[in-house]
């Protein structure tokens, strides 16, 4: 089993069954969306709320929650 690593600067936000990893960088905010068996989607924005809004919009437009059939 893969070991989960703890990053004190990483915030996990759950949305429709997906876990969105949110992190502030010196320049902006990033959100990582893990996709089953693939590379993560990485989205950025100037502020936390905008980054999360972009990520939730991406989930709504592109993917059903884990466990749901498309």
Image: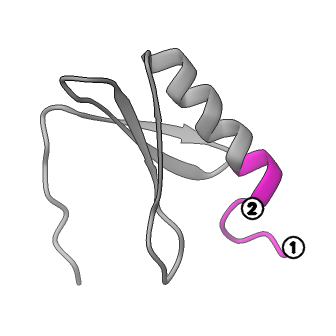
Residue 53 pos. (x, y %)? 63, 27
Residue at image point 53% right, 69% down: 35
Q: How was the colour assigned to the protein in this rendering? A: one colour
Assess whether residue 58 is covered by the magenta stretch. no
Left or right position of 33 against 67: left
**The quarter of the displayed image where residue 9 is located:** top left
Q: Which mark is residue 70?
A: 1
Q: Which mark is residue 12?
A: none
Assess whether residue 66 is covered by the magenta stretch. yes
Give the answer, above or below, for where 63 lies relative to 58.
below
The quarter in which the C terminus is drawn is bottom right
What residue is disc 2 on?
63
Give the answer, above or below, for where 1 lies relative to 56.
below
Q: Earlier in the sequence, mark 1 or mark 2?
A: 2
Left or right position of 14 against 27: right
Residue at image point 48% right, 79% down: 38
Q: Which secondary structure, mark 1?
A: loop
> What span is colored magenta in the figure?
59-70
Residue at image point 33% right, 24% down: 28
Q: Which secondary structure, mark 2?
A: loop
What is the crowding at mark 1: few (fewer than 14 residues within 10 Å), some, or many (at least 20)?
few
The quarter in which the N terminus is drawn is bottom left
User: CB atoms at circles 1 and 2 under 8 Å apart?
Assistant: yes
Residue at image point 53% right, 16% down: 49
Give the answer, above or below, for where 43 lies relative to 46.
below
Q: Name, please, the residue furthest toward the right.
A: 70
Left or right position of 61 against 58: right
């Amino acid at each position: 089993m893969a070991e989960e690593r703890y990053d004190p600067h990483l915030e996990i936000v759950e949305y429709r069954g997906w876990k969105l990893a949110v992190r502030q960088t010196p320049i902006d905010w990033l959100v990582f969306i893990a996709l089953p068996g693939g590379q993560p989607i990485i989205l950025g924005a100037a502020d936390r709320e905008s980054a999360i809004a972009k990520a939730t919009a991406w989930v709504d437009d592109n993917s059903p929650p884990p466990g749901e059939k498309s």
